[in-house]
Image (spheres, grey):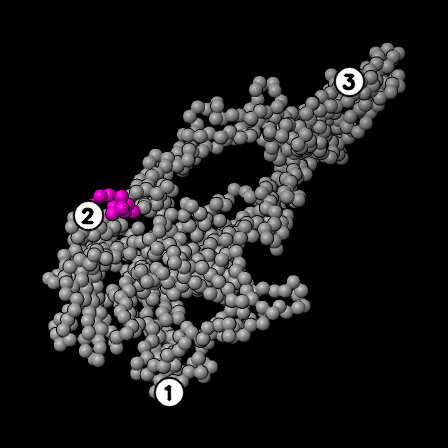
Amino acid sequence: MLGPLNTSSLKLRSIAIEQILSLCCQEGEEWGTQHRLCSSFNNTLEIVPGELRGLCLSTVEICCSKQHKIYKCTEGQIAARQGLSCSLKDGQSGSEFYTDCCEACKIGLVVGSSSSKCSVEPFAFGSPWDEVYDGCCRDIKQGDDTFILNEEDENNLCGRFENLCSQICENTEAGSYMCRCHPGYTLLDDRKTCAQITSEDENEISSTEILDSSDCRRGYEKDQRTGECADVDECETGEATCDTNNQVCMNLEGSYRCLDIQDVKCDAGYRYDRKAGKCEDIDECEDQAACDEGFQCVNIKGSYDCIAVVKNYPLPAKKKVESCAPGFRRHNEQCVDIDECAVDKYACDSNQVCTNEIGGFRCDCKIGFTLDQVTNACVDINECQINAHECLESQRCDNTIGSYTCIRLQSCGTGYTLNAETGNCDDIDECLNEHTCRPNQKCVNSNGSYRCYDLLACPSGFVANSDATECLDIDECSTGKAKCGPGQICKNKHGSYACHCPPGFIIGKNQRCEDINECEMHKGMVCPHNSECINTLGSYRCDCKAGFKKTRPEDLVCTDVDECTEVPGLCHQRCINYYGSYRCGCEPGYKLTANNRTCEDVDECVEYKSNNLCVGICENSPGSYGCRCPQGYRLGHDGRSCIDVDECETRDVCNGRNEICTNIRGSFRCTRIDCPHEYEIDPDRNNRCRRTVRFCQQDDVACLRKPTSYSYNFITLTSNMPVPPTGRALFNLRGPTWYESIDFDMKLIHVDAPANVRPADERYFSLNKLSNEVLLNLVKSIEGPQDIELELSMTVFNNGQPFGSNIAKLFLLISAHEF
């Protein structure tokens, strides 16, 4: 079962979800085509992302199951045409479709054989039964002579079709049948199945349940499990009286037959095993040439099948999806931090120190360097210039990259004088000579300099006036005595001063003003959600994201841009605006081109050719398509099917003397029956010529050998009609049962085919002889158009001498179309 799908995780992928599900469905159909159990699907699907794997497997199972149902429905129709049971007892997958399609086809065969219309409008089974019923019913009307009923068969449906009823089938006078049950059973609502009647008291056995084999006809016995009459295999029970040395026992429905060993004939695909005493299946797959190259031979009972070998084409290689955030990498299915400082030694420049952080890294200036606010580069600090060195007064400060050097001066420098005798620099007492102290100050000498002390002791930040009578505030800001950092604003105070940074800045390292990054400090709270915060020097601004705009420059809120309204002609056909963007769409029957704006017509006839949009001819039109049919067909109500026009019923044709109208797919044929000399049209059957003289003298051998009648039979087939491995029954010729023996023979009289069509020959047909009747089978598909004339003769023998014959002329009319 699929769990809830996290749609937020469905990011943009290289392959759309629809393409992934299409690949999954193809995998399921191929798996089902190989007759494999859908639940055992084990192919690897590397292209499918993990969150779609469950959805893909469900799609595989649905498409595989659909393929199983198609196969089972086809097998059910074949079983109905061969008169087999519509029940599967082995619990195979899709058995319900086998049964339903078999039952629907069997009903269609009965209705088609009774000359009734094949329409399902009065009752309508529903899909897929309507299509199966209609196909089997129309096949009868259009040439499947396997089930053409003569007058005797029309009144004996129970004998002609097996398994119409679960127990007793009775023919009715109206050319139909009804089902009846054995004593102790009751007929269910489906009017064919019998169920055992039980007593109201489950512990009491009803007298109707006590049945014995006397309730069944001879050759049958009661099945204790189902309660139904089942055939007795006399060959297995030992009841048969065959000569085991020279004869083979063949079980029949309700009886058995003893056959001489040399006369035993097995069905096609079987051979007689003398040791086992029965016909055994031939494994045609042991012959290495049974199937062409590229096909695998699969043996089945009585035949074999060639199945195309499915090649496992590799799926497109899975693209590596980076699911970790920037600054992280995948390790053991987890995202771990990348130490950029260790991985990339050039992450920071040579004047910086790299510090790793979670999800990133930081570059700080080395000692002796400071950050330039304009270039964002670490530049050298000139310690000598800003008096941030420790050189003595007798030394000169020389700046170096990242530091400074103290160099002794050759002269003594200010405040000193060179002692010629000692070579040392002696201090100059400036207070004795020149100094700059005011009258209200006292001069005090110091090494290399001097200091002026006020005679009036004023607090810090104040200075005495010239008379030394009053302490005045010192404006450090205007006098230059304030020590504010670069970019700082000096504000004088009474007795002091203060250094402030401008708005948007904060005092940072080295007492410098550093820009405040409001976007990072107040992340998500500075700008509206549909705008992006951009930091600026000393401030910030809010820029609208793509697809949004400000109505007025002073607005703080960004509103959605309706690109479809503001940009005329943005899309070729349809423009769909959505929050923050737009997309282009096309009208039905069109698709977007590579630029995702222009629409082009979809040629459905080419694009979906494999889907068989039209049975006949597909014609593309702008934005759509249409179906039309060749001459002789009309378009069905579904707009795609081609339905043959039966000119013999809808038109006044073939009205000449002794003319017979035969409907062909897409056309019709008028054939005039010209009886041979001494024959005339049978008034009861206009397609048969009978002898004018019906009686012969007993010793008139020539008269006796003349055919009693000639029948002219017209069978229409579509071009390349599929033929099952066991063959397709075309015509049945039956003789009387009271003659000693009957001989059947078939001749190919004439074939008329165009130069580009391969003409049929006798290898396309086979005769299946059964005592007093013969079944003509088609064993290979015939390409149309072409006309084939066959002659099927039947000769009866009495006392070893020919005692009469009949000739059935068969005209096979193969249409030019496959539908």
Amino acid of disc 2: Cys
The residue shown at (47%, 81%) is: 237
The image shows residue 526 at horizontal and vertical percentages of 66, 28
Q: Earlier in the sequence, mark 2 or mark 3?
A: 3
Whole-number angstrom distance, CA of label 1 to CA of label 2: 60 Å
Q: Nearer the viewer, mark 1 or mark 3?
A: 1
Q: Disc 2 marks which residue?
A: 654
Magenta residues span: 644-654
The reply to whether callout 1 and callout 2 are in contact (CB within 8 Å) is no
Q: Disc 1 marks which residue?
A: 243
Asked whether the viewer can see residue 83, the reply is no
Q: Earlier in the sequence, mark 1 or mark 3?
A: 1
- Tell me the number on the disc at residue 214: none
Q: Disc 3 marks which residue?
A: 492
The residue shown at (68%, 25%) is: 504
Amino acid of disc 3: Asn
Q: Helix or strand or loop: what does disc 1 sit on?
A: loop
The residue shown at (68%, 38%) is: 367
- Label 2 neighbourhood size at 10 Å, few (<14), some (14-19), many (20+)? some
Asked whether the viewer can see residue 348, the reply is yes
The residue shown at (42%, 83%) is: 240
In front of the other: 659 or 39 = 659
